[in-house]
């Protein structure tokens, strides 16, 4: 979606390696989210942040870490503790309060070498 | 606990035929309900949303959905499907605090000529 940039589009991870997925937005939205998408499982929430320097775990946070040092940026690190990282990762933003809808980036496909 | 069920994993329809995608939700309070569409390798685009008021909501691309509280359903409909409607469709429920969204597992739509 316009205004949300996810990079890279494709990413490969070697065993034992940490990798970081970038999400940048220029929509001035307060809330940012990371979802993981696996075939047949829909979207599952990894982490979300409603304000700078604060974030909350979602349903599947183990093996992932995030930071929110700036309103515009919400990077996701997939650590070596995440044993099954191959998935499509989606970043989303929303306006608080109420979050009338989510705006989605175009996603990053992470694969394991 | 909040949850969304999309009972149909895959649906095939002929171009020009009508379409109905099913969605059932479980939510403790008045839900915010959404339908999103996803093309392969892309993010999600909002089709329509329901917060309150008229239970029949109109969305983009000729889609509509009806909220039925008694059935905990929010089914998506389109009277005449176009080949370009082939995509993955996700139903979602959100809290009115805006801090979490829950997605169904998706329904994949194939349109045959």
Image: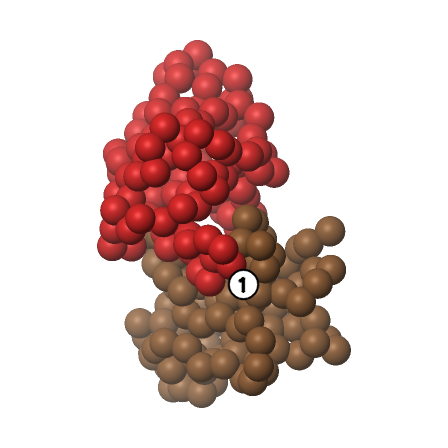
Residue B37 visible in image: yes
User: Nearest the camera: A74 or A17?
Assistant: A74
- Tell me if B64 is positioned left or right of A7 in this view: right
- Tell me if B66 is positioned left or right of B70 in this view: left
Query: Quick check: A18 above or below B82?
Result: above
How far across and down, in percent of the image, does residue B93 sit?
58, 60
Residue A34 visible in image: no
Q: Residue at x 52, y 36 (%)?
A: A46
In this picture the colour scheme is: by chain
Q: Quadrant of residue A111?
A: top left
Question: Mark 1 sits on what residue?
Answer: B91
User: Nearest the camera: B13 or A23?
Assistant: A23
* The colour assigned to chain A within the rendered structure: red
Which residue reaches farthest top?
A: A16
Q: Residue at x 34, y 44 (%)?
A: A107
How far across and down, in percent of the image, does residue B80 sit?
40, 86
Q: Chain of mark 1?
A: B
How far across and down, in percent of the image, does residue B71 sit?
72, 75
How far across and down, in percent of the image, does residue A102 sit?
43, 56
* The colour assigned to chain B within the rendered structure: brown
Where does the C terminus of chain B fall, quadrant-wise? bottom left
Query: Quick check: A3 above or below B14?
Result: above
User: Nearest the camera: A64 or A87?
Assistant: A64
């Amino acid at each position: 979606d316009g205004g949300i940039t996810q990079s890279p589009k494709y990413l490969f991870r070697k065993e034992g390696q940490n990798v970081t997925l970038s999400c940048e937005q220029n929509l001035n939205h307060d809330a940012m989210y990371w979802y993981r998408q696996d075939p047949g499982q829909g979207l599952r929430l990894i982490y979300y942040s409603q304000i700078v320097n604060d974030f909350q775990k979602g349903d599947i946070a183990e093996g992932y870490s995030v930071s929110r040092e700036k309103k515009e940026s919400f990077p996701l690190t997939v650590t070596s503790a995440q044993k099954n990282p191959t998935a499509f990762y989606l970043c989303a933003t929303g306006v608080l309060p109420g979050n009338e809808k989510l705006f989605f980036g175009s996603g990053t496909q992470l694969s394991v070498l | 606990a909040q949850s969304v069920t999309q009972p149909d994993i895959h649906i095939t329809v002929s171009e020009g035929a009508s379409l109905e995608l099913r969605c059932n939700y479980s939510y403790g309070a008045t839900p915010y309900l959404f339908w999103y569409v996803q093309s392969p390798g892309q993010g999600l685009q909002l089709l329509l949303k329901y917060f309150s008021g008229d239970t029949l909501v109109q969305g983009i691309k000729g889609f509509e959905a009806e909220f039925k509280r008694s059935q905990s359903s929010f089914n998506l409909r389109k009277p005449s499907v176009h080949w370009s409607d082939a995509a993955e469709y996700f139903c979602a429920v959100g809290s009115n605090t805006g801090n979490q969204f829950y997605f169904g597992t998706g329904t994949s739509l194939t349109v045959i000529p």
